[in-house]
Image: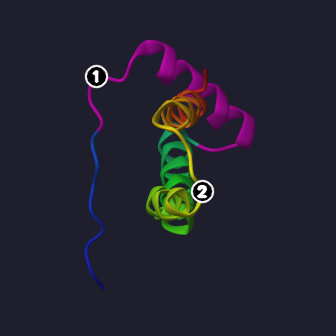
Amino acid sequence: MSAVPTLYVRNVPPKVYKALKRWAGESGRSVNAEALAILEREAARREQGGDWFDRLLEFRKTVPLSDEAADLAIAAIRAHREGR
């Protein structure tokens, strides 16, 4: 049996920890188990769609967009990812 790595997270902002603790309580898990569940979901999401940006660049080659339109599209994607 191989060793399971341990991850320590330092400097967690209080607001983030409070939300994590609430989510853990809502799902009946410990804070550690909730953090691990979130990391596992995010890892799976990134694995499934990790090449989206490369696909977007390939798609951009097939659709004529002005540089301004492309910049607007990239800004919209970034804003969405940041939750704005």
Instruction: Verify CB contact (< 8 Å) between mark 1 and mark 2.
Output: no
Q: Amino acid at mark 2?
A: Val
Q: How is the image coloured?
A: rainbow
At horizontal 55% and vertical 29% (from top left) the residue drawn is: 72
36 up-or-down from 59: above or below:
above
**Residue 32: where, in percent of width, then height?**
47, 43
Query: Magenta residues, as a range?
Result: 9-29
- Secondary structure of the residue carrying tag 1 is loop
Q: Nearer the viewer, mark 1 or mark 2?
A: 2
At horizontal 30% and vertical 68% (from top left) the residue drawn is: 4
Residue 19 belongs to the span the image colors magenta: yes
Left or right of 45 in this view: 11: left
SS assignment for the magenta stretch, majority: helix
**Residue 26: where, in percent of width, then height?**
74, 34
Q: Quadrant of residue 23?
A: top right
Give the tally of numbered discs: 2
50 up-or-down from 11: above or below:
below
Left or right of 13 in this view: 27: right
- Label 1 belongs to which residue? 11
- Label 2 belongs to which residue? 63
Q: Give me the disc on residue 28.
A: none
Mark 1 crowdedness (10 Å alpha carbons): few <14, some 14-19, many ≥20: few
